[in-house]
């Protein structure tokens, strides 16, 4: 089986490259002064679960971390939520 090759004549449609001058738009990140506050009060303490509250707070706190550290926090929170929800489903 043969693979398609370049078009006859060797001409390709040019793809746009990076902007000239080497300047790129900065990606927005969390505000330097942004600090996550306490979890909102949902009013029903019976419906709350301490492990879920801790995981949600950990995700809120992750916003102030470097991206690599955020990933680890989100993965840990996900695992906590997954395990907690599995135990709730079993009861």
Image (cartoon, helix red, strand yellow):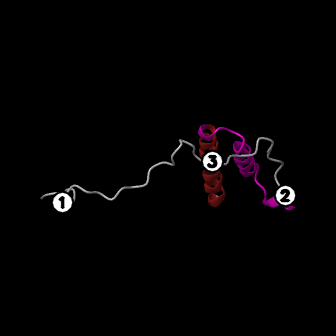
The kind of secondary structure element at disc 2 is: helix
In the rendered image, residue 16, in percent from the top left (x then y), is placed at 43, 54
Label 2: which residue?
45
- Between 73 and 55, the one nearer to me in the picture: 73
- Label 1 – label 2 distance at C-alpha: 72 Å
Magenta segment, which residues? Answer: 41-68
Q: Which mark is residue 8?
A: 1
Residue 52 horizontal side relative to residue 27, left or right? right
| Residue 65 within the magenta-colored segment of the rendering | yes
In the rendered image, residue 38, in percent from the top left (x then y), is placed at 84, 48
- Label 3 – label 1 distance at C-alpha: 41 Å
Q: Earlier in the sequence, mark 2 or mark 3?
A: 3
In the rendered image, residue 89, in percent from the top left (x then y), is placed at 63, 60
Q: Which mark is residue 27?
A: 3
Q: Earlier in the sequence, mark 3 or mark 1?
A: 1
Q: What residue is drawn where x is 39% and y is 55%?
A: 15
- Quarter placement of the C terminus: bottom right
The kind of secondary structure element at disc 1 is: loop
Residue 19 higher or lower than 4, as above or below: above
């Amino acid at each position: 089986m043969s693979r398609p090759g370049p078009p006859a004549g060797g001409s390709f449609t040019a793809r746009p490259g990076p902007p000239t001058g080497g300047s790129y738009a900065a990606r927005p990140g969390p505000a330097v002064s942004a600090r996550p506050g306490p979890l909102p009060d949902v009013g029903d303490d019976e419906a709350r679960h301490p492990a879920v509250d801790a995981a949600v707070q950990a995700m809120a706190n992750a916003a102030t971390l470097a991206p690599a550290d955020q990933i680890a926090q989100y993965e840990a929170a996900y695992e906590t939520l997954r395990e907690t929800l599995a135990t709730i489903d079993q009861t």
